[in-house]
Amino acid sequence: KQEVTQIPAALSVPEGENLVLNCSFTDSAIYNLQWFRQDPGKGLTSLLLIQSSQREQTSGRLNASLDKSSGRSTLYIAASQPGDSATYLCTPWGNMLTFGGGTRLMVKP
Amino acid sequence: NAGVTQTPKFQVLKTGQSMTLQCAQDMNHNSMYWYRQDPGMGLRLIYYSASEGTTDKGEVPNGYNVSRLNKREFSLRLESAAPSQTSVYFCASSPLGGSSSYEQYFGPGTRLTVT
């Protein structure tokens, strides 16, 4: 059974910092890996999708990398802003989409 | 293009009552999913439908039934609600095939409380 661990569980930083959110998963037989953000009381918004054959994807200030063989993915957020405050979820897709506990990010003005 | 919509947004049930959560997508996706989200547990898959006419159990199917009414709609039914089913329920959909296969799109959620 796939298990997903996200570190750190919570993070509080001042505005402007560059951030690294880490994700590890136990089963490397995945089709892709998707990063979501979830705002309190809201649904999930897809940020980036990395196919299993890809090493990274970029969207604006976000960059996600995937090392499938070692079961790791990293989400890099450049020049963080208060609007980035949310929970970030890493979800590898093997037999099904498996969610980790997420990283709760707070960016202070 | 509304994406994935869910009704109702909020619901309070008494133990033993039944209800159906509705989900619809307008993206012509083949696959649809139901998840529940509980504090400290993350999201867990209840049921999914890989294509119209098929449904399969996920990680936590007990106490639930689903119907894939057509390609657009996928409903989740609680026949006899229990307090353990208090949760936030999310519906999602995804296309099949192509470079964007398996990317999932989520609805806004239904907050269900069972007393």
Image (spheres, grey):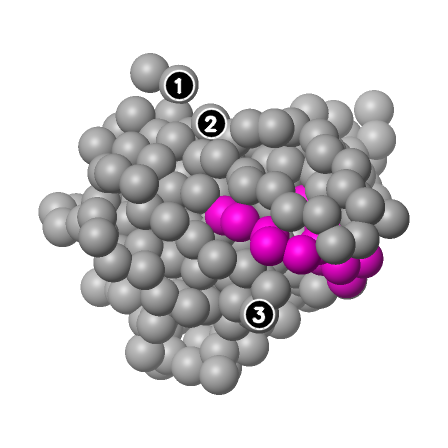
Q: Is residue A95 above or below residue A60?
A: below
Secondary element at image label 1: loop
Dot 1, crowdedness within 10 Å: few (<14), some or many (≥20)? few
* Residue holding disc 2: B5
The residue lying furthest to the top in this view is B1
Residue closer to the observer: A96 or B19: B19
Q: Nearer the viewer, mark 3 or mark 1?
A: 3
Q: Residue at x 71, y 30 (%)?
A: B10
Residue A44 shown left or right of residue B111 in the figure: left
Residue A85 shown left or right of residue A32 in the figure: right
* Residue holding disc 3: B62
Q: Chain of mark 2?
A: B
Image coords of residue B61 (percent x, y):
53, 67
Which badge, 3 or 1, is on the more N-terminal residue? 1
Query: From mark 2 to mark 1, how far is it between C-alphas?
Result: 7 Å
The reply to the same-chain question for discs 2 and 1 is yes
Q: Which amino acid lies under the numbered mark 1 shown in the image of this protein?
A: Ala
Q: Which amino acid lies under the numbered mark 3 shown in the image of this protein?
A: Asn
Confirm whether the magenta stretch covers residue B84.
yes
Which badge, 3 or 2, is on the more N-terminal residue? 2
The magenta stretch spans which residues? B76-88
Q: Given contact means CB atoms under 8 Å apart, are the residues at marks 3 and 2 in contact?
A: no
